[in-house]
Amino acid sequence: MSHGFTPGVLDEVRAVAARYPRREAALLPILRVLQRVSGVLGRAEEELAAELLGFEPIRVREAVTFYSLVRQKPEGRHIIQICINLSCSMAGAGSSLASLQTRLGIGPGETTPDGRFTLLTVECLGNCDQAPCLMVDDDDHGRVREEQLDEILGRYL
Amino acid sequence: MTRERPGLLDLTEHLFEFDIYRSRGGYEAARKALGMLPDAVLAEVRDADLKGRGGAGFPAGVKWGFIPRDGGKPVYLCVNADEGEPGTFKDRWLLTHDPHLLLEGIIITAYAVGAHDGFIYVRGEYETAALRLERAIDEARAAGFLGERIFGTEFGLEVMVHRGAGAYICGEETALLESLEGKRGDPRLKPPFPTSVGLFRCPTVINNVETVSNVPRILRDGAETFRKLGRPGDGGTRLFSVSGAVVKPGLYEVPVGAPLKDLIFEHAGGLPPGRTLKAVIPGGLSAPVLRADEIGLPLDGDSLFRAGSMIGSGAVIVIDDGTSMLDVLGIMTRFYAHESCGQCTPCRIGTSWLHKTVVRLASGNGNMEDIDEIARVASAIKGRTLCPMGDAAALPILALVTKFRTELGSRVEEARVRSGSW
């Protein structure tokens, strides 16, 4: 039942499930906790979630493969999400992206060899008056100019 | 950020803190509402002609009225904070800067429809906003404004934040319900509508953040005051997220029916020096584009609908002469191809096909016949999907290839010359 997770983690996911009037609603919050703990949503995490909620494993897999914030493979310690939708593109997201790729030596969807950053292109972060914008982990960065990129990246070790 | 007159936006610093919100008269509208009969609260909101601010524009009070009385099942309230329509950032502002206003609106709404559980579905990327909301919920509960016996009445309400996990389609209300039930965000066939069969198959009201945030002022000022700010059948003020080629991109509040031109050229400062206006997307990426000569319109749902577009989520994207409409088309098709949930074949196959065609055109391997084929495929998606995303993809693409056919033609020729594909 523990699937290798600590009692602390098991308590946390059970507490999350208990907050909802119906436990099936707790699937995404549980996946979020497990992803935070493990850094990835793999087989062990899927099986634990299925068991806790009384789901067939396939029902968890269906959700895992649907949502873009669920990470199915290990990624960097910090995730850069750069918006490439219309307002950001008009404000120069293309050159910010090119510049990030040069600095990090990786393309979209890739992770730096030292495991520090994963670079992802995304569609609209809802920060369009701050275009071009990006996020590193949960932090918003707006009106990003190329010359600021080194300073921004330097904050994430 | 500006405000035309006392309205929804309150720029007081630290308004997200309970004490500051209270010092601005916060939660007094909820107290007033809970001293009334639920039906009287519902009637007040219905008479205010508050239209939904999320995109579909359905009158909120009418929707509330569909909830069965004493139906024997629990009633749920879901607030749609899955803001994802490209160009839109109004709900982010409300959630981050004025979370107690939303909570006060939730208390009043839940009381009017008889709900005792409320969920705020916040898109996963808005973690800062989600944390602010959770703190606000804790503060409100500590003050006795949430939980059991609110304001000493018999009415009780629990509210929780539910985080999305990255899926544009979950902003569609039935996809949101599926997601909240721990499933893929595949939209449901309607009818039945969520007010009869919603969350956990129970009657459910789903309203956008801005819609619910307008409810306290309606109770405070009365339906008539709110209604008179706007247009017949479409009351109040609206938040517009203005981005793109303007001097002052930002969030602006204007009365429903204010001129679109004023929003762009006065509030947002017009285009940057040396640029001229080419086009405006008036209601988020899914709203059919307007040419520069078509923007003499009032900002209300009916006027934009008559002009062949929509007010949508109130996201105005201003496009200047330096932007290639082939690039705009490419961004549009990529977005819908990426975000289609895949349930309906016309949307799943059609959007991917459209994007591949645009990529081919941009690489110099296409001609005008492909532009016409794009129009035919977009028309084939229109009206053939079970949720509004099919139309949300087809209509803006159709408008763009129709209104900017000449420019697209020359961009396609340029690409052919550049690539040497004669």
Image (tube, rainbow, N blue to C red):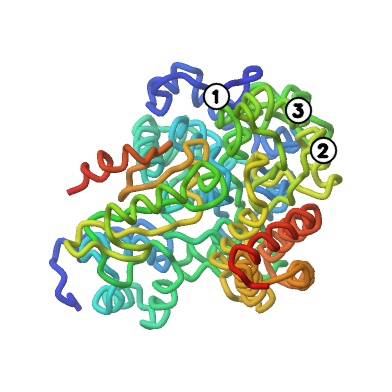
Q: Earlier in the sequence, mark 1 or mark 3?
A: 1
Q: Are marks 3 and 2 in contact (CB under 8 Å)?
A: no
Q: Name the residue rendered at 69%, 66% in the picture.
A: B390
Residue B258's mark? 3
Front-most of residues B57 and B135: B57
Residue A21: x %, y % from top left: 42, 60
- Chain containing the residue with disc 3: B
Going by the image, does B401 lie left or right of B151?
A: right
Label 2 vs 1, first from the N-terminus? 1
Image height check: is B215 above or below A110? above
Check disc 2 and give the amino acid type: Asp
Between A138 and B183, which is closer to the camera in this rendering? A138
Query: In the drawing, does residue B346 fall left or right of residue B117?
Result: right
Is residue B403 in view from this perspective? yes
| Amino acid marked by disc 1 | Met
Residue at 57% in and 63% down: B334
Q: CA distance from mark 1 to mark 3?
A: 16 Å
Q: Name the residue tied to disc 1.
A: B1
Residue B144, image x, y percentages: 40, 32
Give me the residue at 43% from left, 72% from top: A63
What x and y, as percent, mark residue B257? 78, 31
